[in-house]
Image (spheres, rainbow, N blue to C red):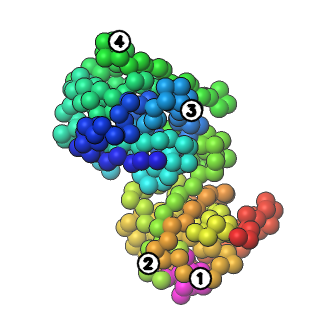
């Protein structure tokens, strides 16, 4: 699988005779936040058509996501960061991810400019899979019908995305976000097709956990996650082992935390994970994040959290296995 970053790199690649895009591609466009069941169905549509035509499958995404560009800190929290999204798309079998920078220059693109520069000249698209409510271009003139009209002359076809429903409602990133905010982890897992998981690199923290008997692996989050509080989690280590644990996700108000972070205490683990990436899957909510009046109160609550987590795991099963 290939990652193409930026319109400049796309144009350079498209000019090469030996380019992977020399025969065109089948593409789709979107945020793909979470790569949920609805997204997975779109990816299957794209891959099926790409196989029929004998060309690569392409997913076009944007960084930052358009709502983040326009709304800044008011934008909804992400389900997945870019690297985790890319790795999930990789696992789905897509050939190419095109990541375009959404900035002032890109937002000024007209609908026809986007079609000509990105879809036709850049990707040499032969088939496009997008929702019939897809809108694009600074003039808001870009829609499904315009793509069809241009495609009839330019030689590409357009197909509507298939809708996926669970319990009678459409699967969407917004619905998953709301489920997580309401601690409906089972529903979120149904919509995602897998447990909700955050993947990140372990960084050095304040070492406070070690002083109160609960050392943690700390992951900094670029923005607030769609859930906050203390949870029973399953942790997948770099060597593939899965271990049980307890995680706090939020701002750590007792110690004046300002950067959103995920702190994970891993049961029955001794070792160093600094600089390595781990997967943290959320199994069960224990409590909300609380600001305590003292470190001693926090220490006592953490001891209760660990006890409560072990009790829940005893009732519902451990994920621990040997690698």
Residue 263 spot, x, y in % from top left: 52, 70
Label 3 sits on residue? 44
State the SS at label 1.
Answer: loop
State the SS at label 3.
Answer: helix
Label 1 sits on residue? 271
Q: CA distance from mark 3 to mark 2?
A: 40 Å
Q: Does label 3 or label 4 sit earlier along the sequence?
A: 3
Label 2 sits on residue? 204
- Give the vertical position of 49 relative to 284 (above or below): above
Q: Which residue is drawn at the image coordinates 57% and 62% (left, top)? A: 279
**How crowded is the residue under tag 4: few (<14 C-alpha within 10 Å), some, or many (20+)?**
few
**How crowded is the residue under tag 1: few (<14 C-alpha within 10 Å), some, or many (20+)?**
few
Q: Does label 4 or label 1 sit earlier along the sequence?
A: 4
Q: Which marked residue is nearer to the observer: mark 1 or mark 3?
A: 3
Residue 317's tag is none
State the SS at label 2.
Answer: loop
- Give the vertical position of 254 relative to 295 (above or below): above
Label 4 sits on residue? 152
Q: CA distance from mark 1 to mark 3?
A: 40 Å
Q: Does label 1 or label 3 sit earlier along the sequence?
A: 3
Which one is in front, 239 or 26? 26
Q: Which marked residue is nearer to the observer: mark 1 or mark 2?
A: 1
Question: Which stretch did the figure color magenta?
Answer: 208-216
Residue 233 spot, x, y in % from top left: 64, 63
Q: Does label 1 or label 2 sit earlier along the sequence?
A: 2
Q: Which residue is drawn at the image coordinates 53% and 25% (left, top)? A: 52
Q: CA distance from mark 1 to mark 2?
A: 14 Å
Question: Can I make out residue 93 in this image?
Answer: yes
Which residue appears farthest toward the bottom when viewing the image? 211
Q: Does label 4 or label 2 sit earlier along the sequence?
A: 4
């Amino acid at each position: 699988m290939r990652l193409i970053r930026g319109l400049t790199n796309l144009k350079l690649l498209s000019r090469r005779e030996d380019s992977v895009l020399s025969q065109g591609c089948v593409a789709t466009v979107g945020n793909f936040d979470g790569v949920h069941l609805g997204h997975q169905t779109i990816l299957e549509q794209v891959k099926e058509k790409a196989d029929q035509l004998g060309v690569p499958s392409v997913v076009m995404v944007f960084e930052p996501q358009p709502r983040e560009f326009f709304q800044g800190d008011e934008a909804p929290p992400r389900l997945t960061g870019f690297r985790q999204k890319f790795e999930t798309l990789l696992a789905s079998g897509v050939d190419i991810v095109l990541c375009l920078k959404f900035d002032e220059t890109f937002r000024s693109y007209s609908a026809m400019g986007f079609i000509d520069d990105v879809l036709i000249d850049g990707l040499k698209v032969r088939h496009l899979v997008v929702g019939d409510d897809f809108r694009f271009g600074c003039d808001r003139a870009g829609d499904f019908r315009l793509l069809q009209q241009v495609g009839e002359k330019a030689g590409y076809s357009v197909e509507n995305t298939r809708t996926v429903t669970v319990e009678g409602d459409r699967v969407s990133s917004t619905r998953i976000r709301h489920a997580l905010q309401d601690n409906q982890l089972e529903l979120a897992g149904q919509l995602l097709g897998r447990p909700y998981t955050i993947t990140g690199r372990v960084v050095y923290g304040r070492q406070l956990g070690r002083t109160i008997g609960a050392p943690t692996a700390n992951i900094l989050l670029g923005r607030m996650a769609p859930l906050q509080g203390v949870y029973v989690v399953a942790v997948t280590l770099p060597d593939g082992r899965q271990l049980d644990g307890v995680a706090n996700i939020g701002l750590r108000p007792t110690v004046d935390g300002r950067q959103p972070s995920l702190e994970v205490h891993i049961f029955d683990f001794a070792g160093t994970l600094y600089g390595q990436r781990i997967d943290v899957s959320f199994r069960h909510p224990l409590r909300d994040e609380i600001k305590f009046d003292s470190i001693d109160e926090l220490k006592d609550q953490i001891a209760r959290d660990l006890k409560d987590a072990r009790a829940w795991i005893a009732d519902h099963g451990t994920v621990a296995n040997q690698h």
